[in-house]
Image (cartoon, rainbow, N blue to C red):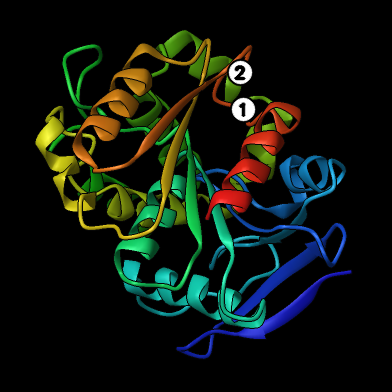
Amino acid sequence: MTQFLYTADGTLLAFDDLGPADAPVVILVHGATAYRAISQSAEALAATGLRVLTYDRRGRGESADAETYAVEREIEDIAVLVDHLGGSAILLGESSGAVLALEAALAGVPVAAVAAFEPPFIVDDRRPPIPADYIARLDAFAADGDRLGALRYFSLEAVGLPAEMVDQMMASPFMAAVEPFAGTLRYDARIMGDTMGGRADALQRYAPISVPVTVLVGETTFPSIRSGAVAFAEMVPGAGLIVVPGGDHQLPADAVAPVLRSIAVSA
């Protein structure tokens, strides 16, 4: 059953609390195109015996939004959820949600550990960096109310998919489910900051994180994401790197759950 709470700035946040109450607690932080109604990750993880709090990030699903956006507000949202859970939890972030989880830990939100699944860092020339005007272009799409245009642009420039694949995706049921909330893609662009610009030194900002961090990448993921994960593990003291067998950019719950249990024991 959906639950609600108010965040620090008075925004209504919708969430589910799944799994055994006495199990290790994980907060799932979705990426750019995910929210509770279209993601099965939380249910799959809870089915393995974990307690999973999954929420709609602001502006998506059943959560409300504010008139203006700042990454700090999303960090405060996570802090409110951690407080609701008693003051500690493991953050599991997917894609750009992994970077938001890292930002929350960097800001001092009292989390036990961070599991960052497939953060889409671009640190070398394995793929082109996002355009310098990427955020401005997404803002323009939002101002024009062109949500499908924003989704297409995101798929081409941020995800890096070929145009013919994007053309096929635009007619898919998935795009129809994401389209109402495509204006929030510009939020994730701000979360990513300059970490998709092709420079590994952009990841130095995460070196001061004081809690354990594990980066997980799928065995068959994009080469650029693997490079980014390796660079992060080299840049952040004590960070671990795990390659998930058979995984790609979709979180495989059965393979990730044992990693989360191990993190919970050692955190």
The image quarter in which residue 244 lies: top right
In the displayed orientation, state which residue is furthest to the front: 266
Which of these two is toward me, 39 or 210? 210
Q: What element carries label 2?
A: loop
Q: Does residue 70 appear in this view?
A: no
Q: Where is residue 152 in the image (x, y as percent from the top left)?
A: 44, 31
In this image, 93 relative to 107: left or right? right
Q: Residues within 10 Å of mark 2 (few under 14, many from 20)?
A: some
Task: Between label 2 and label 1, give the one nearer the viewer.
Answer: 2
Q: Residue at x 85, y 57 (%)?
A: 19
Residue 239 in percent (x, y) is at 34, 40
Q: Residues within 10 Å of mark 1 (few under 14, many from 20)?
A: some
Residue type at numbered disc 2: Gly
Q: At x 68% / y 44%, what residue is drawn?
A: 261
Tell whether 243 sits left or right of 246: left
Pointers 2 and 1 in contact (CB under 8 A)?
Answer: yes
- Residue visible at 54% across and 84% down in the picture: 7
The image shows residue 143, relative to residue 163, as above or below, that is below
Q: For this view, does 50 lie left or right of residue 223?
A: right
- In the rendered image, which residue does mark 1 sit on? 250
Foreground: 213 or 6?
Answer: 213
The front one of 231 and 157 is 231
- Distance of mark 2 from mark 1, alpha carbons? 7 Å
- Quarter containing the N terminus: bottom right
Q: Where is residue 155 in the image (x, y as percent from the top left)?
A: 43, 28
For the residue pair 68 and 85, the one nearer the viewer reads as: 85
Could you tell whether 153 is left or right of 98 in the image?
A: left
State how many labels appear. 2
Position of residue 135 measured from the top left corner of the image (x, y, whole percent): 24, 49
Answer above or below: position of 60 versus 217.
below
Residue type indicated by callout 1: Gln
Tag on residue 247?
A: 2
